[in-house]
Every structure is written in structure tokens, then in C-alpha cells.
Amino acid sequence: MNGQVAEKNSKKDTVLSLDSVHTHIAQYHILHGVSFEVPRNQVTMLLGRNGAGKTTTMRTIMGLWQAASGTITLNGEEIHSDETVTIAKRGLHYVPENMGIFSGLSVEENIRLATRKNKIDPERLEWVFSLFPAIEKFWNWPAGQLSGGQKQMLSISRSIIEPCELLLVDEPSKGLAPAIIENLITAFNQLKANNTTILMVEQNFRMASMLGDHLAIMDDGVVVHEGEMAEFVADKEKQSKLLGLSMESHQ
Ligand SMILES: Nc1ncnc2c1ncn2[C@@H]1O[C@H](COP(=O)(O)OP(=O)(O)OP(=O)(O)O)[C@@H](O)[C@H]1O
Ligand SMILES: [Mg+2]
């Protein structure tokens, strides 16, 4: 038994680690010591009610808010003092809650801008088209004319057009039709199979439980639970205690 535990621990491989991270926005103290880990080649779900601090945590990881104290490490190296561009160059791709696309540019230009050398890998693009047919259909359209769901697909397509070490995605299913959510689940499962580590905020508990391996639950700017998704899914009491009605309200 002890041998098994030791073996499990020695195999544990953490890509990203947050330790006692505090973030202030203007005069407000929003994150009060956030700590959790993102294991390699797994999907980690960041859950919690509205206003719990999930987006602030994502933005702090990306350097869009500066952590006032605490440490954020990527593969053991501290990144919490780095600029956002440096963090992105280290292989962290971020799909923000508000999608962050350029409305005046075409779908193609939006995707091209997300590539390092302005070159799109044709094979990877075929794969993106297969996941999101609307991206192919509206390839030459101004992105501003896409529907909300199509913009979300463009935003995700941009983030996966090149491989990355860690993909941070904030509520990808928001505003999407059920059939598109199924495509998303397939896409993220394929990314996972291709050794991409994912940290995702997701209020749709069906999607969260289908994709997640690991989870961290936030409340009032701290992580109140961290563990395996399978264990959490099996524990209805823990779900209602830690998530209450907040999940159902988003389904
Ligand atoms: N720019 C800002 N200025 C002031 N307060 C902010 C700002 N952004 C977020 N907050 C506050 O920080 C807290 C956490 O917000 P955050 O957006 O991180 O929550 P969340 O968990 O992502 O919520 P949701 O599920 O609604 O997206 C909230 O109380 C929010 O009002
Ligand atoms: Mg949010």
C-alpha cells in the first residue's frame, strides 16, 4: 500500500502551481491566497459560483492582473512577475471569457494572427475545420458579423491553431447550442490525447464532469476543495455542499 502511494506521488507531474496567490483589483482584495495544482496532460476544472474569483485567477496566471503576493510556477519556474507576452511565449494560451477576437478582421486574419510566423499549418487547420465547420464556412467573413456561438468557436480555434503547453479556457460552452458543446467536448478530448494540459472554467457541470480529471473549487477568492473529478462526481453530498445550486442554474 505505502509502496503504491509512493509510486503515485513520484509519477505526479505538475505543469502549473499556484501557492497563496493574492490579487487586488484597484482597492478591492479579490484573491485571498489561491493555491492549487494543474497536473500535466490532464484537464483541470476550476469551478465555483459567480464572483468566486475564477476569471481573476485565470487573468492573474496570464499576468493580466499582477499577483500582490504568493507564487505561480510553470514547470518549476516562477512566472508571477513576468509580462503577459512572456507568459504567452512560454506556451500558455488563453481563451478569455469575452473571447478577445478582432471584429474588423476576417476569420482567417484572426486565426493567422494567432500563429507565430503568420503561417497556418494546413493539417492543423483541417482538424480545426472538422471540429468547427462554421470556421470554414465563414473563413472570409468579418469576425464581427459572426453570432455569439460562432465567435466562441473562432476564439477557441485561435487558441488551438498551434500546439501549446497549457491552454487556459474561461467558460467555453457559454451561449453555445448543445450540438456545438458536443463538438467542444470532442475537441478538448482530442487536445488532451495530444498531450495538451488544460485549465478550464466551466459552469456546465455535464461538460465539466465529462472532461475533467482534476478539479479545484473556489469560493470568495480561495480554493475550498481540490481533488480528482471522478471522486467528486461520485460524492453527491460534497457536490451539493460545495456547489449548491450554482451548477444547475447554468445548465
Ligand atoms: N475589473 C474589476 N473591478 C472591480 N472588481 C472586479 C473586477 N473584475 C472582477 N471583480 C470582482 O472580483 C470578484 C471575482 O470576479 P471574477 O470575475 O473573478 O469571478 P468569476 O468566478 O469568474 O465569476 P463568473 O462565474 O460570474 O464569471 C467579483 O466580486 C467581481 O465583482
Ligand atoms: Mg468569470
Image (cartoon, rainbow, N blue to C red):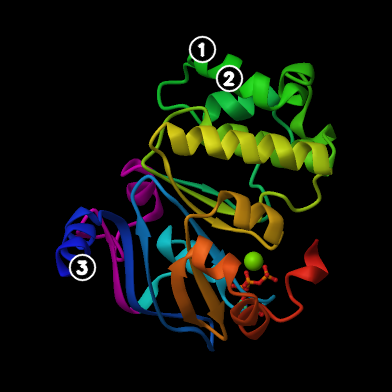
Report how far apart the C-alphas of labels 1 and 2 lie in the structure: 6 Å
Furthest residue toward front: 1
Amino acid type at image mark 2: Trp
Q: Earlier in the sequence, mark 2 or mark 3?
A: 3
Quadrant assignment, res 90: top left
Image quadrant of ligand 2 equals bottom right
- In this orientation, which residue lies closer to the viewer: 113 or 173? 173
x 66%, y 20%: residue: 129
In the picture of the structure, the residue carrying the numbered disc 3 is 1
Magenta residues (range)? 69-91
Q: Earlier in the sequence, mark 1 or mark 3?
A: 3
Q: Secondary structure at mark 2?
A: helix
Mark 1 vs 2: CB contact within 8 A: yes
* For residue 38, side relative to residue 98 (left or right): left
x 23%, y 59%: residue: 8
| Residue 102 at least partly seen | no
In the picture of the structure, the residue carrying the numbered disc 1 is 123
